[in-house]
Image (cartoon, rainbow, N blue to C red):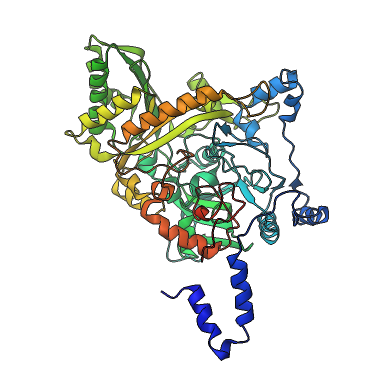
Amino acid sequence: MVTRRDLIRWLAAVPLFASIWPLLRLDDARAAQTPRRVRPGEPGWPTPSDWARLKQQVDGYLIRPESPLELCRESPDNAECLALFRELKNPYFIGDSPVLTQTCEWVGAWRAEPSAYVVAARRVEHVAAAVNFARERNLRVVVRGGGHSYLGTSNAPGSLMIWTRAMNEIRNHDAFVPSGCDGVIPPGPAVSVGAGAIWMHTYEAVTGGVGRYVQGGGCGTVGVAGLIQGGGFGTHSKQFGIASASLLEAEVVTADGAVRVVNARREPDLFWALKGGGGGTFGVVSRLTLRTHELPAVFGLVSCAVVARSDVAYERLLGRFVAFYADSLCNRHWGELATLLPGKRLRIDMSFQGLGKEEVATLWKPFWDWIGLQDDLTMMAAPSIVAGPGRLRWDGTARARFVPGLVVFDDRPGAPDANFFWASNLAEAGHVIHGFDSLWLPAAMLARERQPELVDALMGATRYWLVELHFQKGLAGAPADVIAAGLQTPVNPVVAESFALAIVASEGPPAFDGLTGHEPDVSKAQRDAKLIGLAINELGKVATAGGAYVAESSYFQKDWQAAYWGANYARLLSIKQRYDPHGVFFVRHGVGSEDWSDDGFTRMADSD
């Protein structure tokens, strides 16, 4: 293969190219340097007049952000500070701030700090102006929509933030055809969503508005754009697939400032990369159009909690549940969660669709009857089956009446009824991560002869920490067409052969490093992180293929390229190099980030 430097040497020896040789030498000299982005206060940082021109270009939507935490610094116990910390349990309050993030920080990994400037974009032209400004002045860029990144990618001190929160229009289509695809892709129902929209509002616009279903995330305050670009999963992934598999078209601003509309026929490589190659890596997405699906008539939830009196009894309980899941639940109807808790407890919260309540009761009766016959097992929470009309699935007011305590509303004066979230997600609002790790669990372990190995690994892990089994994250058990569509995204192909994602994690209440009176418990975080590591090692004995879901993984993930994208990484990297050869967009542990320092300010080596 002829390298770029080989070509330069060859051209230098040919008189015909003598006139362009000085330009090539200059370009090579520049490439040989170690580029470094400009920080505030350094030579080359934009002048006040430069920022004023950008402000004019973005119609005044340029902000110098101020942290609301400043009111806590002089007096951490004053009424305003205490009120602020109460609001940190409201994800809508957090999402409306360009400084706060849904995760306050990850102890020992990262902490949230304000960007130097924020473009609060309202239109795609504002995004393009911000990208051009950052590229021309060698600034660090950070892109934020929902602000839900566990890994801290929603913030970067000293950066220019492109904040898409206000670009939240949602529009349904009866018969959408991607640009340039007439006669190739038949028209069909779809929804176009601005980059700042969140899933809760999108679900209600689609389900409540036109009686359709759009595949997205389980946590309703997550941003649509971030989840799609991260190859995200939702409660009903085993029926409707990876969320990005429904992507029909995207509008994106690339590193050259161009506004591109991409789909299966128009710049298909970039389109493919946006279906799970990582948010904020290939450009700034401004709009997405997603296929919508027929709405299930019924959605429901099965819950119960069981405690065992001995290790032997707990092992028997887990063995029975694993067998029951393998035989009856690993299919398109079921998703969500089983949690293996300290004290030999099993908590089950399984969502379903496409089944009636009586049918579900008949399915679960043998499992519950078996528990009732065991002298060393006790039901801590009686079995419960809740089912309701699909049309009301994301109607917060109706759900609050139907199941008391299920939802929490945005409590700010004047907040719309559409601003609600699931009570089960309350712990994630303003939390501090102590430790977090995940692994894809292979469906091969559900074979009858392999189930004891799986149970042994689960027992081993729970000796150290609780384990969550997210059954909707993993496509094993889904219909063949759903699996095939998932394999047409950049997500690690191991997902197609995994029945669940195991998550082992610990968190604390809202806190900020260096904020007196409101600091995280570092000692506890360190202890928790050590135990989480031991637990994930036990699970690794059966999850030998490794791999992790990029949105829910360790900040310290080893071999992250293979873990997140597997064999797809090489293609993603080539697309990154084509559309962003100078690394305007940087996300730690994102495609192409191996060439940069962890903070994204210094290129580590010449990539030629």
Q: Position of residue 539 (x, y in %)?
A: 32, 33
Q: Is residue 404 above or below residue 24?
A: above
Q: Front-most of 380 and 557?
A: 557
In the image, what residue occupies the spot 64% across and 80% down?
22
In the image, what residue occupies the spot 40% across and 35% down?
297
Q: Quadrant of the N terminus?
A: bottom left
Q: Position of residue 34 (x, y in %)?
A: 60, 60
Q: Front-most of 605 and 94?
A: 605
Q: Position of residue 41 (x, y in %)?
A: 76, 49
The tally of labels here is 0
Judge from the rendering whether residue 412 lies leftward or rightward of residue 49; answer left or right. left
- Can the viewer see residue 365? no
Judge from the rendering whether residue 356 lies leftward or rightward of residue 244; answer left or right. left
Q: Is residue 309 above or below residue 111?
A: above
In the image, what residue occupies the spot 64% across and 56% down?
36
Identity of the residue furthest to the right in this view = 49
Identity of the residue furthest to the bottom in this view = 15
Judge from the rendering whether residue 351 lies leftward or rightward of residue 105; answer left or right. left
Judge from the rendering whether residue 52 lies leftward or rightward of residue 465; answer left or right. right
Identity of the residue furthest to the left in this view = 449
Identity of the residue furthest to the top in this view = 375
The image quarter containing residue 479 is top left
The image quarter containing residue 331 is top left
Q: Position of residue 339 (x, y in %)?
A: 37, 25
- Can the viewer see residue 600? yes
